[in-house]
Image: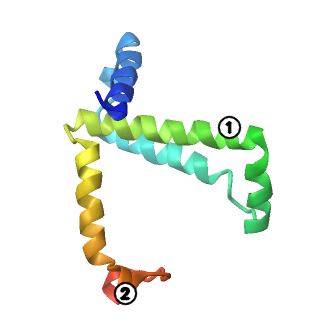
Amino acid sequence: MSEIKKLVEKIKKFRDERDWMQFHNHKDMAISLVLEATEVLEHFQWRSLKDIEKYVKKNKNREAIGEELADVAIYLLELADNLGINLTDAIEKKLIKNAKKYPVQKAKGKYTKYNKL
């Protein structure tokens, strides 16, 4: 069993032990995913790049950011599972698609969107 599948099983066990599936419809899961992502942003809001470098070097801040990223990942993994989406396959397909949209010879070192390359 892959590491992702093991995590999904742990997430589902945690959810089901609390009878929370009744609240985990697709809409609310998508909303929760975005809300948790904004909590990641709070760690960087109003800080310069120099300040961020100092901020993330402190273990307590790295731990707090890690917890927020974990929340994002938990909602992402559960939502994908609830929708019947194999996230590993979806990521592999998206990487192939992105490689075509952003060929190395055109995109290397650039932040330009694919339709402007």
Q: Quadrant of the N terminus?
A: top left
Q: Considering depth in this image, is 114 or 19 the residue closer to the camera?
A: 114
Residue 92: percent from the left, percent from the top?
26, 54
Q: Nearer the viewer, mark 1 or mark 2?
A: 2
- Identity, as a three-letter code, of the amino acid under mark 2: Lys
Q: Give left or right: position of 11 versus 97.
A: right
Please tell me whether mark 2 sits on a helix, a strand or a loop: helix
The disc placed on residue 106 is 2
In which quadrant of the rendered view does residue 51 lie?
bottom right
Mark 1 neighbour density, 10 Å: few (under 14) some (14–19) many (20 or more) = few
Residue plotted at (28% across, 44% down) = 87
In the rendered view, tell whether residue 98 sits above or below residue 61: below
Mark 2 neighbour density, 10 Å: few (under 14) some (14–19) many (20 or more) = few
Q: Quadrant of the C terminus?
A: bottom left
Residues marked 1 and 2 touching at CB (< 8 Å): no
Residue 114: percent from the left, percent from the top?
34, 81
Residue 40: percent from the left, percent from the top?
59, 48
Q: Considering depth in this image, is 51 or 15 the residue closer to the camera?
A: 51
The disc placed on residue 63 is 1
In the rendered view, tell whether residue 108 sits above or below residue 3: below
Residue plotted at (64% across, 43% down) = 65
Please tell me whether mark 1 sits on a helix, a strand or a loop: helix
- Identity, as a three-letter code, of the amino acid under mark 1: Glu
**Residue 48 visible, this angle:** no
